Image (tube, rainbow, N blue to C red):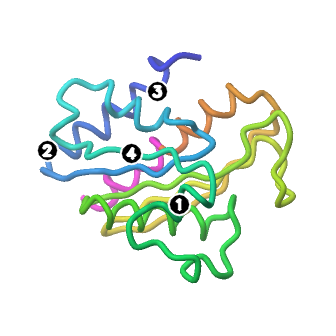
Amino acid sequence: MTLNDLLPDAKKVAASLKARKETIAVAESSAGGLITAALLAVPGASAYCLGGAVIYTRKALLGLRDIREDMLAGLTPSTEAYALFKARAIRERFSADWGIGETGAAGPTGSRYGYPAGHACLAVAGRIERAITLETGSSDRVANMHAFAAAALKLLAESIAGDG
């Protein structure tokens, strides 16, 4: 698995966003920056990709402008609701048309919240909001990181196309 494996969906996203003159911002954790890297690997990324953040911890999330502890009340990491919160927050903070949030457990062990390795939740926030859960059934950390990024890019491409 390489960054090149993520490019087909990243190119779909790039073409759609460029054609619509829209932008994206990314808040990822277990994917470790691979979602943003794939989007930036497509030439002309400055036209649509405003940036991304690897928000690996609660402390990092609270470091975003205007994110307060009370906003996270009732939210558990590695859930669809948490991924959607991150997608909305990054979209708002970057003033983007779209935001994507990812949270999960890459492995080789599960999370402290009881989720197994290979569990991730992905969400898109824009005119359409969607969240999904991915279970790879694998404890291979690198393979899971790639799977999470690929699923996030696919969800984003489908969401943008569905909004068309």
Give coordinates of residue 120: x percent, y percent: 67, 50
Q: Secondary structure at mark 4?
A: strand
Q: Which residue is mark 3?
A: 6
Q: Which residue is mark 4?
A: 52
Is residue 64 rendered to the left or right of residue 72?
left
Mark 4 or mark 2: name the one nearer the start of the chain. 2
Image-quadrant location for residue 97 = bottom left
Mark number, residue 19: 2
Query: Disc 3 or disc 1, which is closer to the eye?
Result: 1
| Prevailing secondary structure class for the magenta stretch in the rendered image | helix
Q: Give 33 or 19, whichever is nearer the viewer.
A: 33
Residue density around tag 3, few if under 14, some if 14–19, many if 20 or more, within 10 Å: many
Q: Secondary structure at mark 2?
A: helix
Q: Give the residue type that dot 2 points to.
A: Ala
Q: Give the residue type that dot 4 points to.
A: Gly
Q: Give the residue type that dot 1 points to.
A: Leu
